[in-house]
Amino acid sequence: MRSQRTEASIQSMLECVFNKLKDWSVIWGYTLLPRTLNIDFIPAEDPDLGKCHFASNTVFLNASLLQSGKESLLLETLCHEAAHWMAFRRHGLGIESHGPEWEAYMRKAGFEPRAHYHDQ
């Protein structure tokens, strides 16, 4: 069972996630993003840090990101996946997964475009 402090820490990180998503929505010129894009979590054992499902408008983040307290990696992963969603929304499925459209959204949000993995 988690302690109250851990629960408070997780709640704080979730609030930060939502606030960052709102910030990026302004930067990216799509202020409906926080109301359109769903955020859910996948089990910590999953090898992926994040996944983007276009059909369900959902970004999945690895639960280990919350449990580890690595807020910077959590935010970078959220941005990585949200940038995929934005690139798809604006340019369609015919673009490269980590192509220039995706890279532009990452840079606008202040992140270096890169792929990262569970063991990093």
Image: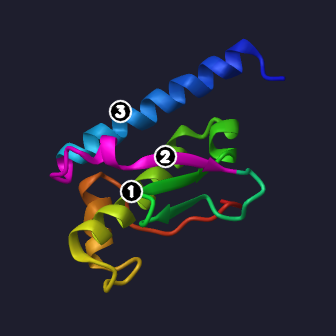
84 horizontally vs 24: left or right = right
Quadrant where the N terminus lies?
top right
- Judge by depth and name the residue closer to the eye, 60 or 105: 60
Q: Under tag 1, what secondary structure?
A: helix
Image: 116 above or below 110: below
Image: 51 above or below 93: above
Neighbour tally class for label 2: few under 14, some 14-19, many 20 plus, Cα within 10 Å: some
Whichever of callouts 1 and 2 sits on the residue coming sooner in the sequence is 2
Task: Tell me where residue 42 appears, x and y as whole percent.
Answer: 66, 52
Amino acid at circle 1? Ala
**Mark 2 or mark 3: which is in front?**
2
Task: Tell me where residue 91 appears, x and y as whole percent.
Answer: 23, 75
Mark number for residue 19?
Answer: 3
Q: Can you identify the residue that label 2 sits on? A: 39
Whichever of callouts 2 and 3 sits on the residue coming sooner in the sequence is 3
Q: Under tag 3, what secondary structure?
A: helix
Q: Can you identify the residue that label 1 sits on? A: 82
Amino acid at circle 3? Asn
19 horizontally vs 68: left or right = left
